[in-house]
Amino acid sequence: MTAAGRETAHDSECDLLVVGGGINGAGVARDAAGRGLCVVLCEKDDLASHTSSASTKLIHGGLRYLEYYEFALVRKALIEREVLLRSAPHIMWPLRFVMPHVAGQRPALLIRAGLFLYDFLAKRELLPASCGIDLRCHVAGRALKPEFKRGFVYSDGWVDDARLVLLNAMDACRKGATIKTRTACTALRREADCWYATLRGADGKETVVRARCVVNAAGPWTASLLGMALPQRRSQTLRLIKGSHIVVKRIFEHDHAYIFQHRDGRIVFAIPYERDFTLIGTTDLDYRGDANKVAIDASEIAYLCDLVSQYFTAPVKPEDVVWTYAGVRPLVEDSAQDAKAVTRDYRFEVDQQGAPLISIFGGKITTFRKLAEDAVDLVGKALGNRHPGWTAKACLPGGDLYGDTPQNCAVLRYEEWRNKLLDQYDWLPRVLVARYARAYGTRIHTLLSGRVKLEDMGAELEPGLYVAEVEYLCRYEWAVTAEDILWRRSKLGLHAPAGAEGRLDAWLAAYVAADSASPAKPPCGSPGDGA
């Protein structure tokens, strides 16, 4: 076929093409598929492989945004906080934060007023209110220097950010969406009432998708994709803000997190992480480098270590760091001079000079569901789809612990549900069942279907990682590489011995070869039935 002929042919048609497999793209695909639209999502790398797996992993209103008078954003996020907790209580849960008071920084009365506002900007059913504490007799005070005598405690939520993206993609898939990972959109052109998108897979094969509408959810690449689609149009610009995190061995034994203030106005969190570790972050720096190669630098590591060492009795040193990660947040360019003051709210740019193109600018992980709902409302209006939003009252895959609809009891009685699993699967190590419960929720029954003894799990490829889980991740969650499995589908990479990635990649290569040769097995990387 000639090049010209290749450009005019198309391999598939859809109502909506979503470009970008981060949290916004996956959320849009899920919402749209649930409203009956034919959806294709393409992501140039793995799902959640960039910004959406590099967050501080919080479901929160954003306490510090109150200082910038972003009351509407904070209220929207606080409302979403409990909606999300109910929808996936296995990968999200309430977390209490301790804020030591520092003399000479924000006055105690101002902090108390801010926390009061934070408590009452939106209705709370799951999370307790804030309060003042005496750190000299509170469990959280033991790890702190003795000069910190007074503090405050408030509530927010924790989330496994990468798995949140996966669950949205899985739900989109089981509602009929096509999810194409490792598939880049290399060309996008409009012809009257449709878009022609050229998609290139990891094998170099190109296909053309004809779409009635496109949602540009490309994150840090949103402006680039918009420029490719509409080269003559000037659009909003993105301000890329780098946030970096460090992970160290566990500093404290309790289950509270800390929020620390700094003289420069920034705040940094120290959070219990993966049982044996403490997660510390984040920085806020303008970023102008390659969005594909974002990494923490030595000055950021030193900054985070220095800041938390001002609070903890035991200093944190750069040599204590066992892992780091960094990502860029694609925020709406505004007049803020300081990176930390740039708004985290989202905006849409809609072009309807022919087939509609909706580009997403900004946003934060806590408001992704509302962002997706608003975006699909725009899509529905443009395409004549009148189905209303539905995701506020729907569980994500695995989140139906106590029924098909989100329930408060799923959050409040999670441990009761988990303990029943420990009894049901008593032939497995308890720590493994507990991890499966957190990662997969009710889908643990799919993972363990037909297995009744440890030998049925297959070989233990790395500590705590059995063939059964790897096969599940390949079949239902688009896992292809060891990095996908060890660092996004799980954080087992933190616990694995040296060389684990190489060994697992070698096993996966052999598995894919056998998988491809066997027509009886579903293709590796495809979600298959029941996803």
Image (cartoon, rainbow, N blue to C red):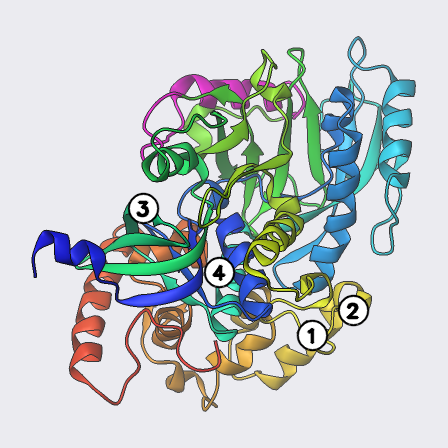
Q: Name the residue: 61% across, 15% down.
A: 336
Q: Is residue 515 left or right of residue 65?
A: left
SS at badge 2: loop
Q: Which residue is mark 1?
A: 401
Q: Nearer the viewer, residue 311 or 168?
A: 168
Question: x and y percent of residue 1 in the render?
Answer: 7, 61
Q: Is residue 377 left or right of residue 276?
A: right
Classed neighbour count for the residue bearing mark 1: other residues with Cα under 10 Å, few (<14), some (14–19), many (≥20): many
SS at badge 1: loop
Classed neighbour count for the residue bearing mark 2: other residues with Cα under 10 Å, few (<14), some (14–19), many (≥20): many
Q: Nearer the viewer, residue 240 or 376?
A: 376
- Alpha carbon separation for disc pair 3 and 4: 29 Å
Q: Is residue 494 left or right of residue 420?
A: left
Classed neighbour count for the residue bearing mark 4: other residues with Cα under 10 Å, few (<14), some (14–19), many (≥20): many
Residue 189's disc number: 3
- Alpha carbon separation for disc pair 1 and 2: 9 Å
SS at badge 3: strand
Label 2 vs 3, first from the N-terminus: 3
Q: Which residue is mark 2?
A: 407
Instruction: Name the residue type under label 3.
Output: Arg
Q: Name the residue: 91% across, 26% down.
A: 113
Instruction: Name the residue type under label 2.
Output: Gln
Label 3 vs 1, first from the N-terminus: 3
